[in-house]
Amino acid sequence: MGDNSEELKKLLDGELSPDALEEDPILAKLAERIYGEEFLEKMGLSRGESKRALSESLSDDDGDDLLIEVIPPFESEIEPFEAPTSLPSRPEKTGLSKLGLGIGFTILTAGVANLFGLLSFLGKGCTGGGCPVDGHTRMNWASLGQLSDGWGWSQPVLEGSIGIPDLGVIGIGIIALLWTYMKR
């Protein structure tokens, strides 16, 4: 097929004559693929003639066969290796997570135990009013430096007393547990 796209347009529009198909085997092959074998037979062309003409047109004088591509062999200096038979082992990080769980659990336990006055044994040396011996068994987290006098102690949660620092300590314990659990 030449550079003439006009003939291709006529083929697609269905206006190409059988003589033009006989002269150009590539157009005849395209017509066969687009419209089918029956189209060529109705135009008076046999399928064998168009194939023969097509193969003759493709075998030009230069001797190259356009339908075969020769791929050179792959040569590499990399030597083949055996595929691994097992997955590589992952190092376990259980030590750090156990430590984090222990710290989070300790903070949470201390916060809850303090709410109920279970840490009142730390106030044995307390003097003055408001000490654990007076019924003030909950430590004030904001006043940890004053456990030896009454300012470091409050009434337990059972008496209706709870403070923001108490909720903060319990929240920190829960966050530490969740953080450690999520990192596992």
Image: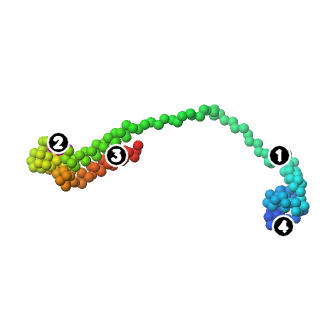
Task: Look at label 1 and name its amino acid.
Answer: Asp
Q: Note whether residue 53 is visible.
A: no
- Residue for badge 1: 64
Q: Residues within 10 Å of mark 1 (few under 14, many from 20)?
A: few
**182 left or right of 112?**
right
Task: Look at label 3 and name its amino acid.
Answer: Leu
- Residue for badge 3: 177
- Residue for badge 4: 15
Q: Nearer the viewer, mark 4 or mark 1?
A: 4
**45 left or right of 175?**
right
**Which is more N-terminal, label 2 or label 1?**
1
Helix, strand or loop at mark 4: loop
Task: Look at label 2 and name its amino acid.
Answer: Phe
Q: Residues within 10 Å of mark 2 (few under 14, many from 20)?
A: few
Q: Is residue 46 magenta?
A: no
Q: Are marks 4 and 1 in contact (CB under 8 Å)?
A: no
